[in-house]
Amino acid sequence: MNAPERPDAFKTGDLKVVGTRPVRPDGNDKVTGKAVFGPDFKAANMLQGALLRSPHAHARIRSIDIRKAEALPGVKAVVTREDFPTLEDILMNVGETAGSVLDLSQNVIAREKVFYDGHVVAGVAATSEAVAREALALIEVDYEVLPHVIGIEDAFRPDAPVLHDTVFTRGLDEKPEQPSNVPLRMRQAKGDVEIALGDAAATVSGHYSMLPVHQGYIEPHACVASWKADGKVDIWCSSQGAFNVRGLTSAILGIPTGTIRVMPLEIGGGFGGKTTVYLEPLAVVLSRKAGRPVRLTMSRTDIFRASGPAPGAVLDVRLGATAEGTLTAAEVEFKYSSGAFSGYEVFLGISSAIGHYNIQNYVVTGWGVLSNMPKHAAYRAPGAPQVNFAVESAMNELAEKLGMDPLELRLKNAIRPGETSMSGTPHGEIALVECLEAARDHPHYSEPLGPNQGRGVACGYWGNHGGPSTASVAVAEDGSILVVEGNPDIGGSRASMALMAAETFGVDYGQVSVTIADTSSIGFSGVTGGSRTTFATGKAVVEASRAVVEILCDRAAKLWNVDRAQVEWRDGEAICGAGEKAGETLSLARIAAKADNTGGPISAEASVNPLDHLPGYAVHICDAEVDRETGHTRILRYTTVQDVGRAIHPDYVEGQMQGGAVQGIGWALNEAFVYDANGRLDNPGFLDYRMPVASDLPMIETVMIERPNPAHPYGVKGVGEVPIVPPLAAVAAAVSEATGVRMRDLPITPDRVHAVLHPDG
Amino acid sequence: MRTAAFHSPRTVEEAVALLAGDAAARPLAGGSDLIVQMQSGRVAPSAIVDLKRIDGLVGVRRRGQGFVIGAATPCTALRDDAALVAAWPGVVEAANLIGSVQIRNRATMAGNLCNASPAADSVPALVAAAATCLVVGPDGEREVPVQAIPTAPGRTSLAAGEFVAEIRLPAQAQGGSDAYLRSIPRTEMDIAVVGAGAHVVIGADGVCTTARIAIGAAAPTVLLVEEAGNALVGGRFDDNALEAMVAAVRAACVPIDDKRGTARYRTAMAGVLARRTVLTALNRATKGAKGHA
Amino acid sequence: MSKLHVTCTVNGDPREFLCDPADTLLSVLRGPLDLTGSKEGCGSGDCGACTVVLDGQMVCSCLVLAGEAEGSVIGTIEGVAEGSGLHPVQRHFLEKAALQCGFCTPGFIVAAKALLDQTPNPTETEVRYWLAGNLCRCTGYDKIVKAVMEAAAELRQERIPA
């Protein structure tokens, strides 16, 4: 079992603070405009930077002439590929893990070729933004425009324009002789699918597709970098991981990690899209050349043109089942776009495909496909929603074919605790079955529907993650508790950390403050991503808190002059268990006040690297109404049921469920990257990249199924990502039922629905 | 080119002189199109001439039984004029579908018109209402039908130094009303994929005496589909008449495929929306007629 | 090119600034006036993160030129709280967890307050349509709408004379 049972001091009934809904520590600053986000930070004597981006989807850069730009008054630095380490240098410095760094370094600034509309070619730092922009217009780039390719199937073809002549498909039986746009094929299989499909009482098959979609965070990427004469570098930026920014900047620029200090600013949304770097290495190089701090900010257009969307996909699914509804076979094959450079979503797509079901015969095959789009980036449960859409849509079709209720079909096949996942690991305390039962029994599921209305369901999962985190906990002179962590707070995690610390100390929530430290002020912490923060960083906070409790007990023992073993910690104070002071208590404040006499400052740091996380499961129910004349879909009611482990701060768990569901609704109905014939993004703004607005939606009902993870002191499972997995299929199924036509292609826009309902115009 | 000056003239004459004296200067009303275009670098006016401080260019006033809407009147202000809302509910609702509340607190119908987008929400409603505009310029002033302003996407018939100072709506006829509907993928914040405005007048006997149907985003400029109106005049909006009206609307459409919708979908929607819009206008006209009686 | 000199009232205080003719009100608020609570999410009026109240009307400050502000009265997120106490809309945003990342929050709060100033008893649908010009990517709007409805209810209570 990857989630062993273990005795723990904290049972459900004992919890006093965990599970309450206090105001978040950073809340006041965020409702009053005081919080400092990425674009808000200013440094003294700062220059404004601007970036020249390729107007071509694919072109060779013959030459770049920056002389006129450099001569413009007010321009303090102009940088091009010449100012960055060569790929050979990076390879030498970084070693065998260089692959992704090489890609990232080219994504940050184009070298031999530009690979997409918006690819950075040069940068300017000047005394004002207007001067910087004027300078950009003076940079002369000589491009040799090359044929480009955007669509997955187009890029997959053997005669497609090839982006990189170094890419040969990995994962085939034999290495191909020709380079291609297909860096990777992966396959996982068990049993014999063909025989099982042949024997199945019922089978379904379908072809599905979707276009790339963007994370759509409202805060633009922004940073300020300051290179100092002694070679030290300060970076202020918002990201999902300051250590990640430090590490990538160091690798891309070939400067020692220890000389870079990254100050995390408040982050205005990321959803995975801020787990990489775009601006920071450019700002550092501009600052080095200018000798002054440089700010870079992306416009919304830049964000859409040049920061990573999530993969588009084409998928084929075949399912087979017995007449009673037991799944016997699944064949899944998908191709994911990854933009101009290789991604890792194929791997995650395979591991997210069918692992929520028990199936004895399966083969899941994934292909990665390069094309002239920006390098894709993680987006909430990266790689999972795409394949889930196809598999869950097929499940709904299978239920109909078998004459079974779609939730009953899923219940019959749902993975249960102790059963083995696709990766061969047995699952511990998982609650997919409870989620499905709760959905089935929810009043929503039996509410009558009107004409032109349909109801869809889908379920899905996300593996979640653990990994490295550091936290330190100190007791202030008056007994206040100061928690320091290294993970940016993207959705209320300061509150979760404070709750877990307060619970561990047995004090009020208000007695704890939480600070997110810069990379030189706390030990390493992985990104805020993978639904890992409350789990892994939470573990570090609890571990450090427990270590401090241990010190406090030790100090109390000293003050009482008794053995440490005679001191117990309860409800925020030490209790003396023996000697003449038996029964006496010492409060945190009193122990803190005497710290100098008992051994000095009281603090502890914990570094953890847990991998005993558990996956999260979700079941969504969606009601939709379709206007058959216009093809418009309206979401009438939406319910999410989720296996959340224990909800540390239930409001923010519900918030994750609601926010993820709505991102999924947008993905299903309206969002898509649209390219024109020249390979330029045709909808690089919020006007035509249509994310849901408030009037598009009903309330999003939430049902939290709390089955704690025994491997976490307070039972935490990751909750942030799985909410975006089921909506695509749930929405499509609702529209399919409302219209009587299967919706296999996303987004389900009004014109697409209209075309399906009115094939003759 | 950098924008070198910002002018706030107090009179129309002053504004005309500023615009006539500088071919690259641009008039500013609400700014919700112009400023976006300036920010994206699509336009770089040499100077901005703000019309909002000119007397009479902000606000709605009566002109006989009709209305004069100053060019710099924000869309939301139209809703505050009860008489205008009663007479031309379709024009007011069209103007109040543009963008968001924040946008409509700045955006103006004159700006919507002069931006010359075929998808401008207020224009089909104005065309259906037979609205005119007062154009002022170095050669004096002229009154032209609203549909004479846009000539192609992004282009207008305005000569150098000219701008629209007023939009004029005629008196609403006894038994008349109007409506506007548009199709967008979301519920708010989108550009019309197709829009349809209708103005109908019914006589005491319920017979249609006037019908003007205008369609947006189905051609390079807003279409006034006279055949569609003709199909309704003289009848009582029975299914045959409505079908003929819809057929005329669809026949007039020459839309394009773009990121906002297919040509096929636009043509189909033009018919659906025209029918719904006419019925809404009819319903209002009928209620209005009863109200008068 | 000469700078414009603009005088206006911001959050009740007389302010003046120099700007270029093409500068937006948002860039002036965030730059010379040092009021970074108003955010730029798009620069094209599509996200509402820069919402301020200009002469009594809520607007996107990215779609107002700074020169237009001459003589105007402007309210930003920094002026919503009353002294050290929060406005009920702000308090209910906190109590209902109506923010996750918090970047869109200033725009939502300014817009929500503008709604309640003129419509004390909005329906859920009215709240949703009023706020349609404000994008939030984190919350799915559920808790935002609830917070606004609760703030409205509290403000109505306050308005009832004792």
Image (tube, coloured by chain):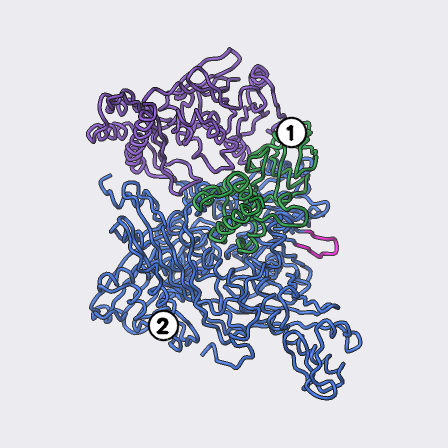
Chain colours: A blue, B purple, C green
Chain letter of the residue carrying label 2: A
The residue lying furthest to the bottom in this view is A579
A550 and B185: which one is in front? A550
Q: Nearer the viewer, mark 2 or mark 1?
A: 1
Query: CA gap, disc 2 to disc 1?
Result: 66 Å
| Vertical comparison of A307 with A683: above or below | below
**Quadrant where the image shows the C terminus of chain A:** top left
Chain letter of the residue carrying label 1: C
Q: Which mark is residue C70?
A: 1
B118 and C34: which one is in front? C34
Question: Residue A536, position in %: x, y?
Answer: 55, 69
Q: Residue at x 55, y 47 (%)?
A: C157
A371 and A445: which one is in front? A445
Residue C122 left/right relative to B2: left
Q: Amino acid at mark 1?
A: Glu
Residue A86, picture quadrant: bottom right
The residue segment tinted magenta is A226-235
Question: Residue B124, position in %: x, y?
Answer: 37, 27
C159 and C105: which one is in front? C159
**Quadrant where the image shows the N terminus of chain A:** bottom left
Callout 1: helix, strand or loop?
A: loop
Q: Residue at x 72, y 73 (%)?
A: A602
Is residue B254 visible from the viewing direction of this image? yes
Counting other residues with Cα less than 10 Å from the Cα at mark 2, is it few (<14), some (14-19), or many (20 or more)?
Answer: many
Q: Amino acid at mark 2?
A: Ile
Question: Residue A383, position in %: x, y?
Answer: 42, 60
Is A228 one of the magenta-colored residues? yes
Residue indicated by mark 2? A415
The residue lying furthest to the front in this view is C162
